[in-house]
Amino acid sequence: MRVNTSLLHGYPVLDTQTGAASIPKYQTSTFAQKKIGSKQDYSYTRFGNPTVHALEEAFAKLEKADYALAYASGMAAISNVLMLLEGGDHLLLPKEVYGGTCQFANHILPRYDIEVSCIDMSDINEIKAHLKPNTKMIYLETPSNPLLKITDIAAVVALAKQHQILTVADNTFMTALYQNPLALGVDIVVESVTKFINGHSDVVAGVAATNDKEIYQQLLLYQKNFGAVLGVEEAWLVLRGMKTMGLRMEKSIDNATQIAAFLQTCPNVKRVYYPTLPNHPNAAIQKKQATNGGAVLSFEVSNQAVLEAVIDKLQIPILAVSLGGVESILSHPATMSHACLSQEERQKQGVTNNLLRLSCGIEDLEDLLADLKQALGC
């Protein structure tokens, strides 16, 4: 089945009990047991729930994975995966990794004697140079947030396998529709479902997927005992949102591609970050491992006055944290997604105060371009 058919029919979408065309919300914390000691599929919603289970089956289909787990947020999925590390282990992260991941790695993992190095993962030689005997995990984020840097997934996987190192990829920006890290050999994929998978800016959720049964069982234990389970209402909303994911993303990506090209012509824009632009240093790698550049771009304006004008004058995109909604969302990484980092840490990553990130929605392209032109003075 092709993308849109698969999103509607490729996993259980009908209630087996009644034939309902929408999986019901099993809004319950507990389930009646027939007798003491009896084995049944569901006993307590933190251990499993039919609505959440249906979503996890949908996630497995989407990610082309044998196993998938739903979490209460993207950070819940990420933190559960990072806790697979043990005391004395070494973790490699991109230096421009998502701010929440960076904060968890730098402020929580050291308490468990886990060493962290943040490096430039767009350069495979940098990764090789920072490997240690105790390196146990390489964590990728490609394209990266917010500078859209690209990591060669296949090259990292080959390197990791030589040294028996676990690989994890945050695939939030591309989703499995357009980039499949598991097929490229990555051990675990994580995504913030809050973003494109749900796509309506009304749910906070996360997913982790793998083809390794042992990893899955360990993550299942953590999911239950850390209590990072997704609520029933949220699971139902994501099931609904996924049905239009292919259509939504196709439009958003088309908008992003054309807006990125336009921004390069604007005198008040200093630099545009989008992975399929000809001047992107790793455009060839992006083309090799993904089918397009995604729906998110970033751009640095020429000065503070232009920044303030854009924020004040833009009418269509909302100014907000997050991305991946049907509406276009403009973010200021220095005070939003990366606000938890110090100014020094942001400067190291290249997250300047004049940098803006635009998650393109499904609005008419002509309206978005006209709005950007008047706000930027182009």
Image (cartoon, rainbow, N blue to C red):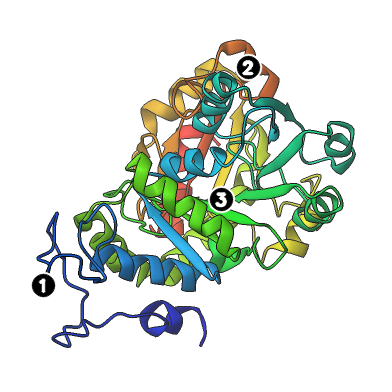
22 w.r.t. 347: above or below: below
CA gap between label 2 and label 1 equals 57 Å
Residue extending furthest toward the front: 36
Image quadrant holding the C terminus, namely top right
In the picture, the disc for residue 345 is 2
- Quarter occupied by residue 123: top right
Which residue is under mark 1? 34
The disc labelled 3 sits on which kind of residue?
Ile
Which residue is under mark 3? 259
Viewer-closest of 60 and 270: 60
Looking at the image, which residue is at 48% across and 51% down? 219
Tell me the SS state at disc 3: helix
Image position, residue 213 (x, y; %): 56, 64
Tell me the SS state at disc 2: helix
Q: Contact (CB < 8 A) between labels 2 and 1?
A: no
Tell me the SS state at disc 1: loop
Image position, residue 249 (x, y; %): 47, 63
Local crowd size for mark 1, using a 10 Å CA cut-off: few (<14), some (14–19), many (≥20)? few
The disc labelled 2 sits on which kind of residue?
Glu
Looking at the image, which residue is at 51% across and 88% down? 1
Mark sitting earlier along the chain (3/2):
3
Viewer-closest of 72 and 359: 72
67 w.r.t. 123: above or below: below
CA gap between label 3 and label 2 equals 29 Å
Can I make out residue 237 in this image? yes
In the picture, the disc for residue 79 is none
